[in-house]
Image (cartoon, rainbow, N blue to C red):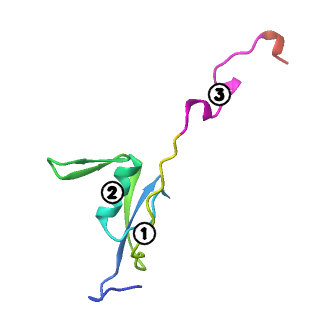
Amino acid sequence: MTTNRADRPVKRYRLMMLNKPIAPWRPTLQDAQADAIAAGVADWDPERRVLFVTVPAAIVIASGPPVPARPTPPPEPEKRSFRQRRPMSHAAGRSRPASQIG
């Protein structure tokens, strides 16, 4: 296990969504929180000084090798238009005329 000068495990932080990473490992919790806000899955309440993370997103804390000094920026959230979504199948409620059945 990697340790720092004080012989403690090095902590790292990562934003996850449905157990899949949506941002790289970060050296500080504040960096991971910034990733969550940038991805649109968290909001900061300045009065309470609390970060609200939308479920099913989570910030994971792990011990392991140190994070590079210059981490990569968080990925841009995927934007899909209405027309890019999967088409609805016939079994999902749309009926077909009798001439097209069978």
- Which label sits in the foreground, 3 or 1? 1
Furthest toward the right, the residue is 102
Q: Secondary structure at mark 3?
A: loop
Q: Earlier in the sequence, mark 3 or mark 1?
A: 1
Q: Residues within 10 Å of mark 3 (few under 14, many from 20)?
A: few
- Which residue is at 41% across, 72% downward? 70
Q: Which residue is mark 3?
A: 88
- Which residue is at 44% across, 57% downward? 16
- Which label sits in the foreground, 2 or 3? 2
Residue 90 falls inside the magenta stretch: yes
Q: Residues within 10 Å of mark 2 (few under 14, many from 20)?
A: some
- Which residue is at 21% across, 52% downward? 50
Question: Where in the figure is residue 29, as x and y percent of width and height?
Answer: 30, 65
Furthest toward the left, the residue is 47
Mark 3 belongs to which amino acid? Answer: Met
Q: Secondary structure at mark 2?
A: helix
Residue 101 found in image quarter: top right
Mark 2 belongs to which amino acid? Answer: Ala
Residue 6 falls inside the magenta stretch: no
Q: Which residue is mark 2?
A: 34
In the rendered view of the protein, which quadrant contains the N terminus? bottom left
Q: Secondary structure at mark 1?
A: loop
Q: Which residues are magenta?
A: 80-97
In the rendered view of the protein, which quadrant contains the C terminus? top right
